[in-house]
Image: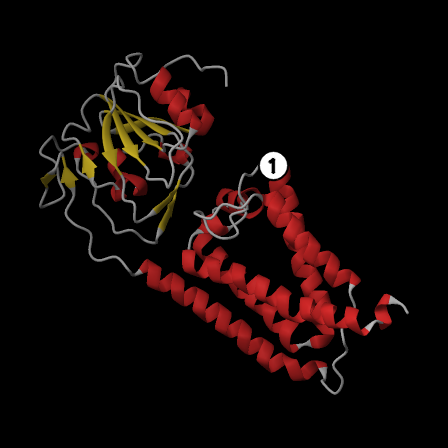
Amino acid sequence: MTLYKNSTAKKIGSLLTRVLVPLWILTGAIFKLVAQTPSTLPKFTIFDPARSLDIDLGILLNVLIGLEFLAIGVIVFMPRLSRLMAGFMLGSFVLILTNELFKGADSCGCLGGKIKIHPGVMMGIDGALLVGVIVLPIFKVHGVRLMTGIVPAVAVTVLGFSVSFGAMSMSQNRGEAPPPPIVNNKLESDGQSDLAQDPCAAAPVQIAFPNFWYVSGDINDWVGQCWNQIDLFKLIRQWPEDIAEGEKLVVLYRLDCDHCEEMFNNDFTGKITTPILAYHIPVDSSNWSLPANHTAKLYDLSNETEWIITTPLVVKLVDGRIECAAEGEGFEACLGVEPADH
């Protein structure tokens, strides 16, 4: 008896293809819906290329969620295309995860930024499902025309797009009117500093958080601009009163970032005399602690927002104007120190 004629194999194949696979795809879609953050997108395959092309990551995220609902609708309601669509989706997942694994990603991002699953583990799951879909036969559904399943499949697709973009709209409109700017813990009623009429001396016109997440753009575009014109800085609530006087280093760091640890231990313990304003991005777990003899003035960013920023992010200000901006392992470029061997 061949595998194709084996009724047990067909039962398993049908259960796998028409039930387990769409449930698996639905699980990923639900996590993306709940998280509403681009950190659920594969970093090297989708997130980074989209970011470099200046594609709206919120729209991209919800389009992909809608397409996953499309796949679910086809698999469930169009039996003749079930194996084809299930194989296509799982095959795409495996290819993406292979690239993520090759590029050195430590998490697939599939279930949000806080649930880290190694791409190799997820590839093993998706790969096993893909083999099952390819190898195991399924029962043919007699009397059901291909066109019959189009209406419910379209309905599921419309539902998916509606829910995903509805969730995005709710997250974008969740914030109330932003509070007045705070400079050195003092309210500025008109959003202006008392320093001078120089445009770089004004306090930033603060904005409400547009999403549950913030993604920094091309920081090279910041060079030459006044500090108070940068969207990221408009989201930060606390600034020293003399921010636009002389040289300043604005630093964003995490306690799970190795380069941030290197920066604090090697550079912020007396080597640099420029005033350092260090803004802490909250994380779930810490790999290191701040050295006791660091010279930075510390602030905390909101823990209600997911800050999707490459750290450390170092910005050098001269009289309120951005002279240099660097991130990641290139952070020394703005510190005025000799690069260390990484």
Q: Amino acid at mark 1?
A: Lys
Q: Is residue 109 visible?
A: yes
Along the viewing direction, whichever of 191 and 199 lies nearer the viewer? 191
Residue 184's x, y, as percent? 13, 34
Along the viewing direction, whichever of 162 and 227 lies nearer the viewer? 162
- Secondary structure at badge 1 equals helix
Residue 19's x, y, as percent? 63, 70
302 to 262, vertically: above or below: below
186 to 33, vertically: above or below: above
Residue 24's x, y, as percent? 58, 62
Q: Is residue 67 visible?
A: no
Judge left or right: residue 2 versus residue 163. Answer: right
Taking the view exactly as shown, the residue that stands out farthest to the right is: 1
316 to 30, vertically: above or below: above
Residue located at (19% from left, 28% from top): 244
Along the viewing direction, whichever of 176 and 203 lies nearer the viewer? 176
- For disc 1, the neighbor class at 10 Å (few under 14, some 14 to 19, many from 20) is few
Taking the view exactly as shown, the residue that stands out farthest to the bottom is: 143
* Quadrant holding the N terminus: bottom right
Residue 135's x, y, as percent? 79, 61
Residue located at (43% from left, 25% from top): 259
Q: Return the residue at label 1.
A: 103
